[in-house]
């Protein structure tokens, strides 16, 4: 296992906090690349996969765009474009709501659910290979990541 110093060929950091920030960004990018490699054979982007997982979790209920955005990992994504591409692949159904013609209800299709079942096997293998943490270590990491996102009030 290479250290962050070796990975980015930097000898020293201004502080341990600066090193942790670079390490976190580098690791997130590395993990995103690993996930993209698993998704590639399915023709999915990480953002499309995220939307499908959200919709699968709400199945059989449809969701509004606003509700999907509130649950996305990257909520600044262009959801209209993502849903359009998923609709082209026949992975989602999109219908206008009756009470507001500007709002759409989005639901996952049976073929997308089937594909997700197959894809989840690859994702589980990836997690085992890329996150060699036991339950206590993963719990500690989760707590530290939550702490980073909690504002210092």
Image: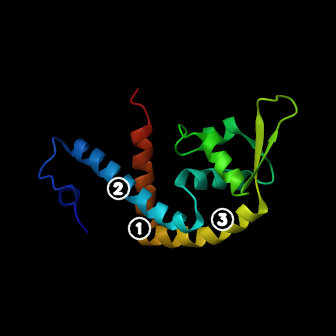
The residue drawn where x is 43% and y is 62% is 136
Would residue 38 be visible to someone looking at this image? yes
Question: What residue lies at 77% left-to-right and 37% top-to-bottom?
Answer: 104
Q: Quadrant of the C terminus?
A: top left
In which quarter of the view is residue 21 placed? top left
- Disc 1 designates what residue? 130
Residue that badge 3 annotates: 116
Q: Are marks 3 and 1 in contact (CB under 8 Å)?
A: no
Residue at image point 45% right, 44% down: 146
In this rendering, position of residue 64 left or right of residue 126: right
Q: How would you rate the neighbour count of disc 3 (Cα within 10 Å): few for under 14, some for 14-19, many for 20 or more?
A: some
- Label 2, secondary structure: give it: helix
Residue behind mark 2: 27
121 or 141: nearer the eye?
Answer: 121
Q: Nearer the viewer, mark 3 or mark 1?
A: 3
Quarter placement of the N terminus: bottom left
Q: Residue furthest left?
A: 11
Element at badge 1? helix
Q: Give yes or no for contact between labels 2 and 1 (Cβ–Cβ under 8 Å).
A: no
């Amino acid at each position: 296992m290479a250290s962050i110093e070796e990975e980015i060929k930097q000898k020293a950091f201004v502080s341990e906090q600066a090193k942790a920030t670079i390490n976190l960004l580098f690791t997130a990018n590395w993990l995103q690349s690993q996930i993209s490699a698993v998704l590639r054979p399915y023709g999915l982007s990480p953002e499309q996969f995220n939307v499908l997982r959200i919709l699968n979790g709400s199945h059989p209920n449809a969701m509004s765009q606003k509700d999907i955005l509130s649950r996305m990992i990257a909520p600044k994504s262009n959801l209209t474009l993502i849903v359009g591409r998923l609709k082209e692949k026949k992975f989602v159904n999109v219908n206008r709501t009756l009470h507001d013609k500007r709002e759409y209800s989005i639901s996952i299709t049976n073929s997308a659910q089937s594909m997700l079942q197959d894809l989840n096997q690859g994702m589980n293998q990836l997690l085992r290979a890329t996150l060699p943490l036991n339950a206590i270590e993963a719990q500690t990491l989760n707590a530290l990541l939550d702490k980073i996102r909690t504002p210092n009030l």
